Amino acid sequence: MKSSSFPASTANDSEITVQRTDWNDLSQAVRDLIEAHTGPVWAARTVPAGLNAQFAAVLDTENGPLFTKGLRTDHPGVARQGREAMINPHVLSLTPQLRWQVEGAGWNLLAFAYIPGARHADYSPGSADLPTVVQVINRLQPIRCLDLPVKRPSSGGRLTSTMTVTWPC
């Protein structure tokens, strides 16, 4: 099985390493689950960038390319991925649209509209990306995500009981 290790990026799961799995290394049940939403996958290109997905690929399908990512359902990052799906409809002016979300065959999967040439921003001092990052943050500030359930942090930093809040995305 071809995979790569990536360190996790959040304080709560900073000890966790994410193993990237290629399309051909997914079980047939997972590929069937995805193809139930996409139709036949003609080609898959693993996306090496990013730290939080065990599976991340651009899938070429009969309806065009999709960026698809996922985590095994027992991975602690599944909650974070669920929040990403909940917030997506509120931030469509800034982010690719979530096309579908599915859980099955031991995986939680999200598929987004594919944006050719998309890449992570460079946050290093003097980067040409920094003015764009500031513009995006300024556009993000007034957006409200109404009545989204979120987990309340406990004193130990773990997320516990659910509460509903109105908060900026």
Image (cartoon, helix red, strand yellow):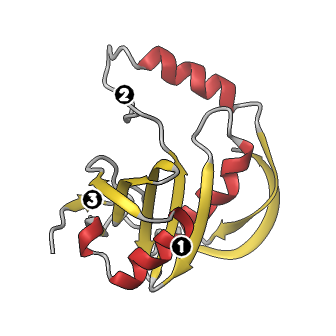
Q: Which residue is mark 3?
A: 7
Residue 36: image tag: 1
**Residue drawn 68% across and 68% down?**
152
Q: Earlier in the sequence, mark 2 or mark 3?
A: 3
Circle 2: residue type: Tyr
Drawn side of residue 59 relative to residue 93, left or right: left
Quarter occupied by residue 42: bottom left
Q: Do the residues bearing badges 2 and 3 touch, measured as CB atoms within 8 Å?
A: no
Compare residues 140 and 114 and report the one nearer the observer: 114
Mark 3: secondary structure: strand
Q: Which residue is mark 2?
A: 123
Drawn side of residue 91 relative to residue 124, left or right: right
Q: Position of residue 114 (x, y in %)?
A: 48, 43
Quarter of the figure that contains the N terminus? bottom left
Q: Earlier in the sequence, mark 1 or mark 3?
A: 3
At label 3, counting other C-alpha atoms closer than 10 Å, the crowd grade (few under 14, some 14-19, many 20 or more) is some
Quarter occupied by residue 86: bottom right
Q: For the residues carrying marks 1 and 3, which lies nearer the camera in this image?
A: 1
At label 1, counting other C-alpha atoms closer than 10 Å, the crowd grade (few under 14, some 14-19, many 20 or more) is few
Residue lying furthest left:
2
Q: Position of residue 92 (x, y in %)?
A: 68, 39
Drawn side of residue 103 relative to residue 151, left or right: left
Quarter of the figure that contains the C terminus? top right
Give the spatial CA distance, label 1 vs label 3.
31 Å
Quarter occupied by residue 80: bottom right
